[in-house]
Amino acid sequence: MMVDGVPYRTIWLAQEGEGAGWQVEIIDQTRLPHIFETVRLTNLDDAAHAIRAMLVRGAPLIGATAAYGVALAMRADTSDDALDQACETLLATRPTAVNLGWALAEMQAHLRNRPRDQRAAAAYARAVEICDEDVAICEGIGRNGLALFEDIWTAKGQQGRLNVLTHCNAGWLATVDWGTALAPIYMAHDGGIPVHVWVDETRPRNQGAALTAWELGKHGVPHTVIVDNAGGHLMQKGEVDLCITGTDRTAANGDVCNKIGTYLKALAAHDNGVPFYVALPGPTIDWEMPDGNAIPIEERDPAEVSCIEGRLADGTTAPVQLTPDASAAANYAFDVTPARLVTALVTERGVCAASTDGLANLYNKEKNA
Amino acid sequence: MMVDGVPYRTIWLAQEGEGAGWQVEIIDQTRLPHIFETVRLTNLDDAAHAIRAMLVRGAPLIGATAAYGVALAMRADTSDDALDQACETLLATRPTAVNLGWALAEMQAHLRNRPRDQRAAAAYARAVEICDEDVAICEGIGRNGLALFEDIWTAKGQQGRLNVLTHCNAGWLATVDWGTALAPIYMAHDGGIPVHVWVDETRPRNQGAALTAWELGKHGVPHTVIVDNAGGHLMQKGEVDLCITGTDRTAANGDVCNKIGTYLKALAAHDNGVPFYVALPGPTIDWEMPDGNAIPIEERDPAEVSCIEGRLADGTTAPVQLTPDASAAANYAFDVTPARLVTALVTERGVCAASTDGLANLYNKEKNA
């Protein structure tokens, strides 16, 4: 998407200077929203660091960065040992990231039985493909979501603006381009629908206030940041035409596991008759998970709740503590929104009911007896 | 309640040193939770500043401070002009605070027709009474809420701990002592029920993370701070036995207007069969307001959303900016929780259904036709 009028992806091959055509560039997302800075990755360690230190985040982008990490490793050493070592190093950066494992398995399969003198070129080619495939999936989600937006905009008589509420960051910064939940927003905006986005700040890590607000702003999409407490009131007042979020993991019955707080917004949408859509790439459906109850919910560092980072008056960033020293904090990273609260799932293959039948039909899966 | 083993109210007559018996002491709540500091009010301007700069906050405490402000003014000058001037000055500090107007009207009525040489003593006496009346109301709320807590604790088989979720600060810091929603929590804790409180941080002003966590901790009540997004997940997992919040304004039909985000927690409680109680002093019932729809919702400074204050590593406090410079923010202060989501209202007169009949019976009001 655009950054001040210049089109960007979140990861790309360097186009200029020494290393053009083989070094990899990324946006350092840890510095957003206050500083926009790109970083060059010139070797395996750079790529591993970028994932580990969360310069890149979001499942698809982590996978793409890992693929490029293997390519950078192959450029230095095309041996089997180097390939194994690269995959091992990269896998250890964020062991629970599903896309990371998938991308590394892809690279292994693509390179393993190939002559050594072809491995580097093949690695770059496959990394490029992985990125393009992700962009294609997100474009598909965007097109399918756009049709829903157009229907709601028409039903509203094309009056005023189309108010969309989103939670967390399911934007292009989390993917290679377009994003998932934000893809239809960009397409609607680019297509002339006057979209306005209510951006949940998304405590504790504030991916909404920091990343969603930044990327919408840079592309020129009107938006307003709100605290996570505000969405229910806005829906009561008719200020939200639809909600759309991403999901980290979708159970076979359509239950969605997404950033903590998603469930509360889905409840409010249901209570006020506001459509609640969830955007997802097919590969994040967990067909082995019959429903959301069994999905384990990660508990993260309580310091993410008790402290928050922001920009001081002098322009530097620093963490500040919010709670008394003596108070405990707890940090649940995700919650499960039951399928009954989800109006529809928006995938690259189309839109379907959040149900076992809906998903199974779309992906031609045999239903469980 | 207790602060490190010493009993405190939020406002009291100085007991020691010069000014003992007529100067007024308060806790500077702007410095909490990081610094506990008391401040002496020696004249009208001190009292006005304390309200205006929010060293004191919470409707009952604002009223009590205003009453003492009039007493301090009378000590300096007992003329009618001085009385009028004091009331005018104090009313202008926070013009929308209902209790402020009420307390000043009380003081006027109490002093106006009294000989000048009796006014100062009468003013102090009435201010003390206003404080004691507030304490009695909160004690009543606490006793009536305690009975509900005991029932739930019994129904739970007195196993484990009694998990209570609260939003914002409806504690003793907002009143003279006990608080409203927190009064039954203190009584249950003091009475030996192993209460544990989930404290919503309550963005944007973080009254939960800063004030509720501080006062519970100082009294010794086990508690855990969570982000506002987390309560729904905890209720899904059976980790909340009941919710209790305060309310700024209660409509005649039992709709409650409270801190933004209360509605979302009430939805989650309803969806998970968790009792959702709202604690209130009778005087905050707005008998002229038939339901919550017409209650105007204050929009506050967007900077409360885009920035937050906390403690830096060096121990000083500072605001940090969370959002991109170019992003707008919106700051709705309250929302309305419909009576259908409120299990019961807890008042100083007893517990009643959140309904026109429930409230009218409790307060012997004639119902509207």
Image (cartoon, coloured by chain):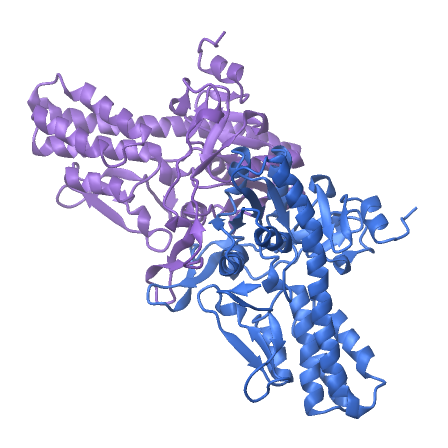
Chain colours: A purple, B blue
Q: Position of residue B81 (x, y in %)?
A: 77, 89
Percent x, y of residue B313? 33, 63
| Quadrant in which the N terminus of chain A is drawn | top left
* Front-lying residue, B185 or A144: B185
**Above or below: residue B150 compared with residue B211:** above
Q: Residue at x 16, y 24 (%)?
A: A122
Residue B265, image quadrant = top right
Q: Position of residue B212 (x, y in %)?
A: 54, 57
Q: Which residue is at the far right?
A: B369
Where's residue A112, x and y in %?
14, 19
Residue lying farthest top? A369
Q: Residue at x 54, y 53 (%)?
A: B202
Residue B321 to residue A349: above or below: below
Quadrant of the image occupied by residue B110:
bottom right
In the depicted structure, whether residue A117 falls above or below residue A38: above
Q: How many marks?
A: 0
* Residue in front for this viewpoint, A134 or B54: B54
**Front-most of residues A115 and A330:** A330
- Taking the spot 66% from the left edge, 70% from the top edge, the residue there is B62
> Against A253, is A131 above or below?
below
Side (left or right) of B237 relative to B352 = left
* Residue A14 seen: no
Q: Residue furthest front?
A: B192
Asked if one can make out residue B317 in the rendered structure from this viewpoint, the answer is yes
